[in-house]
Amino acid sequence: MSVKVKRYMFNNLKNKTDVKFHYIVIDNHHLNDNFHNNVELCFNFVLTTYLKQLCQKRRMQNVKLYLDERNCSVHSLNSLQDYLRIELTLANDYADKVSDCTYCNSENEEIIQIADMLANLVYRACCNRNRKSDGNAHLLKELSPEQNMYFPYRYNDLPFFEKNIL
């Protein structure tokens, strides 16, 4: 899909809905071995850290997560939901409840299809990180200039990534 078509689709979504685009980039080359060797631990930690920062800025009543089942790296979804409940509602008063963590088939869920488009945009922007004229990076910067996360941030060298949520 060309950048022009992506821009058209994302801008229509932004202008006609209340959607906001956020993303997390995990740098596998610089992960601590404890995270690199335990995908579930890394996923739970990074996602929870991100959500805590996001909820600090705007308290949530109800947190619901829909995850693409094709990228199923977490063996126990209950552990993620329980971890989020502990961190967002009990240890910190960032949300009233965490009601759902569900894996969805992208064929049946439009929101997952949109997330796939955003993931592809982030991937292409990261692959062309040394090209300042890359249209994917410019579009990503337009759509989502802040409230994103690069983990671990100290290794971030993406020219389009201006502000880390942490």
Image (cartoon, grey):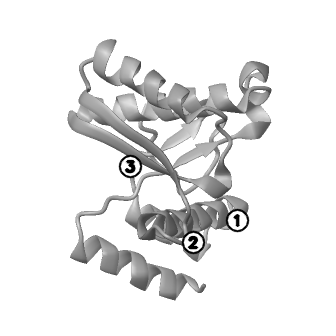
Q: Earlier in the sequence, mark 3 or mark 2?
A: 2
Residue at left offset 26%, top offset 30%: 97
Where does label 1 land, which residue? 128
Residue 37 drawn at (x, y percent)? 80, 26
Residue annotated with mark 3: 146
Label 2 environment density (alpha carbons within 10 Å; few <14, some 14–19, many ≥20): many
Residue tagged 2: 136
Q: Nearer the viewer, residue 166 or 40?
A: 40
Residue at horizontal 56%, vertical 76%? 135
Q: Is 56 displayed left or right of 121 in the figure?
A: left
- Name the secondary structure under disc 2: helix
Q: Amino acid at mark 2?
A: Asn
Q: Amino acid at mark 3?
A: Glu
- Residue contact between numbered discs 3 and 2, judged by CB atoms under 8 Å: no
Residue at the extreme top: 91
The quarter of the displayed image where residue 51 is located: top left
Q: Are marks 2 and 1 in contact (CB under 8 Å)?
A: yes
What residue lies at 31% left-to-right and 39% top-to-bottom?
A: 63
**Label 2, label 1: how far apart the Cα atoms are:** 8 Å
Asked if residue 116 shows in the view, the reply is yes
Cα separation between marks 1 and 3: 20 Å
The C terminus appears in which quarter of the rendering? top left
List x then y, in percent, for residue 34.
75, 19
Using the rendered image of the protein, determine whether residue 58 is visible from the camera's viewpoint: no
Residue at disc 1, secondary structure: loop
Look at 24% across and 19% down and name the residue there: 93
Label 1 packing within 10 angstroms: few (<14), some (14-19), many (20+): some
- Give amino acid for label 1: Asn
Q: Classify 157 as above or below 15.
A: above
Taking depth in this image into account, of 153 and 100 the one nearest to the observer is 100
Q: Secondary structure at mark 3?
A: loop
Q: Earlier in the sequence, mark 2 or mark 1?
A: 1
